[in-house]
Image: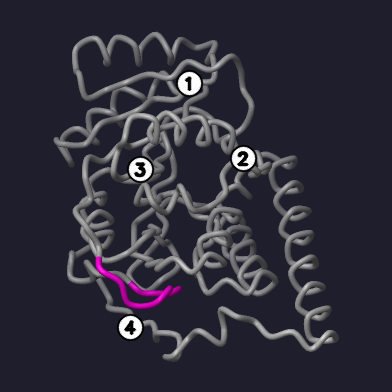
Amino acid sequence: MSDENTQGDPVSDGGPRSYGPLGTALVIIPTYNEAENIGLIVGRVRAAVPAAHVLVADDNSPDGTGKLADELAASDDHVHVLHRKGKEGLGAAYLAGFSWALERDYGVVVEMDADGSHQPEELPRLLTALAGADLVLGSRWVPGGRVVNWPKSREVLSRGGSTYSRLLLDVPIRDVTGGYRAFRRETLEGLGLEDVASAGYCFQVDLARRAVREGFHVVEVPITFVEREFGDSKMSKDIVVEALWRVTQWGLKARTAKLTDLALGKSDPKAEAKAEPEPKTESKES
């Protein structure tokens, strides 16, 4: 895949603004039983973006992932480890990582899976796009994006989940469930993280809808998502059920609020403030 589309596809625009320097990036990698993968993925991140730091957020993995991460950190001052008490879900791990990053003044915070599904070699593309955005999403479903070694049933589930979330929540993001993301610190600070309750993969939907709602400039960049080679997938029926329930709840709440405002004759101040139409997506095949 070429790097032609380095600016990405704008999907949500909070209006013209100027952006300062990005600052140091921290790549957060949540882990639970990823002993076979953690050394490989950390090494690839360090090679792809040598200036970046890595935070392994380990949920007390019984396979010794946390100990392996400690060994990596002992030999590399760009690698850090956050030991958590137990398995509390992807969302909780990222929230703990976000707090750790913001306390230490990192300018950019990146989400990345531990299993190699998110290719570290594509991280420079996300960071390039972030120079002109508030949030960059690595997308499987924009032109140029793709998945490798996925069964058709998994692809249908993922595409269907993104489409359902996009339509119900009125969020113009094609891969709203994807978890390869780069945030400016100011974006994270503006998402109201203190009341995020979603634990599983719907955590990604929650942050995306909040970013759009708050008017942040969101861009999607095509990525190649590769199914893991080692270890077991963390996807489960409970995670899917939680995502379906929460997305439906958020969508119904938002639509009820809009209908109530219409009935009371209230207008949408954000809609009135838009002087220009929403930007068109200009996809480039990679």
Of 63 and 50, nearer the camera is 50
Residue that label 1 marks: 58
Query: Residue visible at 30% across and 72% down?
Result: 17
Q: Main secondary structure of the magenta part?
A: loop
Query: Residue visible at 60% across and 47% down?
Result: 203
**Which sits earlier in the primary sequence, circle 3 or circle 1?**
1
Q: What number is the disc on residue 282?
A: 4
Label 3 sits on a secondary structure element that is: strand
Q: Taking 38 as reference, is 113 above or below it?
A: below
Asked whether, in this view, residue 47 is left or right of residue 32, the answer is left
Q: Residues within 10 Å of mark 2 (few under 14, many from 20)?
A: few
Q: Tell me the mark number nearer the camera, choosing from 3 and 1.
A: 3
C-alpha span from label 2 to label 4: 33 Å
**Which sits earlier in the primary sequence, circle 4 or circle 1?**
1
Q: Taking 44 as reference, is 5 above or below it?
A: below
Residue that label 3 marks: 109
Amino acid carrying mark 1 in the image = Asp
Q: CB under 8 Å between callouts 2 and 3?
A: no
C-alpha span from label 2 to label 3: 24 Å
C-alpha span from label 4 to label 3: 26 Å
Instruction: Please say whether residue 133 is one of the residues in the magenta stretch.
Output: no
**Which sits earlier in the primary sequence, circle 2 or circle 4?**
2
Q: Taking 79 as reference, is 263 above or below it?
A: below
C-alpha span from label 4 to label 1: 39 Å
Q: Tell me the mark number nearer the camera, choosing from 2 and 4.
A: 4
Asked whether, in this view, residue 3 is left or right of residue 197, the answer is left
Instruction: Please say whether residue 12 is one of the residues in the magenta stretch.
Output: yes
Q: What number is the disc on residue 235?
A: 2
- Position in image of residue 168 (x %, y %): 70, 71
Q: CB under 8 Å between callouts 2 and 4?
A: no
Amino acid carrying mark 4 in the image = Glu
Amino acid carrying mark 2 in the image = Met
